[in-house]
Image (spheres, rainbow, N blue to C red):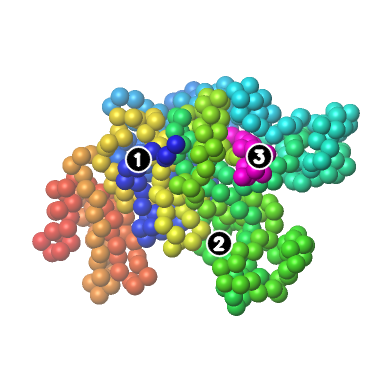
Amino acid sequence: MDPPKEHPTGDFNDPVMRSQVNQISHIGIQAYLVALAAFQRGLKVVFHYEVVSKSERFAHLPVQGYRGEIFSVSNEQRCHYFRRTLGDMTSKACSARVDDKNETKECLARHGVDVPDGLVVHRHSIDAMRRFFARHSSKHFLLKPIDGTEGRGVIRNLSADAVVEQVGSHGDRLMLLEEYLPGSDYRVYVTAGQYIAAVVRLPANVVGTGRDTVQQLIEAKNAQRMEHPVYCHYPIPLNAHVEDYLRGEGLSLESVPGENQRVFLSDVTSVPYGGDVEDITESLPNAVREQAVQAQQALGLPNAGLDLIVSSAGTAQQRVVVLEANQTPYITLLSLPLNPATPSPGNRVAESIIDYYFPESVNNERRTQACFDFMRVCRMLESGLVSEIALPVLGEEWVHKRLKIPASCIEENTPSTVQQVMFRLGIHAQIWPTDRGDFLIDLVAPENQADRFVEILEGG
């Protein structure tokens, strides 16, 4: 089961594209990527201040679109509304099913998908917990909130006694108790029964240089994380947990790992705890792909991010287990690798979502380096003075161009002069100052207007 044949997609190794997305608050990037996929292929994209009066599917939202998270995509045939990566073709019933982790598991199990054995517990569930422990006498356990996200509140690798203590400390709050399954942790993206992409989620880690201590490697990696729009919020912690984990591996913060030696600093595979992800779309085992697709179809979600564990890999006891399903999958870390030197796989998940909602646009021309100023859209919506903001629709006769004005040619009034020409010709453009003092103009416009714009800037 291979990922679909790729069409051209957003190029996040392009410095202008990368600079644009790096300005966005990391939750907003989800909406930006889906809107970008639609914009680049010539569909109409409109960001909305409110959708109560427009889309019954999203009318219940307590917060509307001032953060740029609510938008519509349309062509001459239809219009669909989105909240980040969640579209209006995901029914409320499917959403309710996936919001409840226990109901998700029950649905998957009914459809033959392997899920961890578990039950819902609270502090009065002592007898039920003891019966559960008896079924898993040689195993450790995991506790998590019924409605948690991003690994928050998950407590792993607990003994039976530790489970009882933890559940008691949470009062009457409902928790999901499961068997703990160590193994490789994957996030797999599926759209309409088609495997799209995958990442492996790694605990906090560093890679040795043969010269630097573990602490120096952590500091260097955190400096790199600070340059990323998502990882910047989650530095690798330098705390007692990390020191204890290293000690268990026979290491310390002063140890000097060998060149290319990967050193793990935790066993928690979660970005908020200092972890990161790696793209493994091409190498994900077929058994994992097939289980993810089966889970997406069982839940009835048009698109989903499935979390899976492969436990006891390569043995007779191997299990491919679906842990959770996400109806609003987080797609940023696949498109934007932590190391900017790593080739980006582009915007393939967002592209697959737009393919599903607008199949007739699959073969549209795609301007893979055309972008728009998402933060400007957000600022305008946040002002409360506009109800919606429409992006230009890139018609067949439109082109995308990049122009550079050398620093030696820039005068004080250059930006205002360029803007006046833009407004006069109806050009949609962004002006970017470069590190060298040049101006880079990124524009989309009908070809004749773009040509005239260039002539005027060149003195014609």
* Residue 250 magenta-highlighted: no
Which residue is found at the position 79% from the left and 43% from the top?
Answer: 140
Exactly how many numbered labels are in the figure? 3
Contact (CB < 8 A) between labels 3 and 1?
no
Q: Which three-letter amino acid code belongs to the residue tagged 3?
A: Ala
Label 3 Cα neighbours within 10 Å, binned few <14 / some 14-19 / many ≥20: few
Say above or below: 224 vs 63. Answer: below
Q: Residue 403 at x, y = what percent?
A: 24, 61
Where is mark 3, residue-wise? 316
Q: Which three-letter amino acid code belongs to the residue tagged 2?
A: Arg
Q: How far apart in space, not on screen, are marks 3 and 1 (Cα)?
A: 34 Å
Q: Residue 305 at x, y = what percent?
A: 54, 38
Q: How far apart in space, not on screen, are marks 2 and 3 (Cα)?
A: 39 Å
Is 207 displayed left or right of 50 in the figure?
right
Label annotation for residue 225: 2
Quadrant where the N terminus sits is: top left
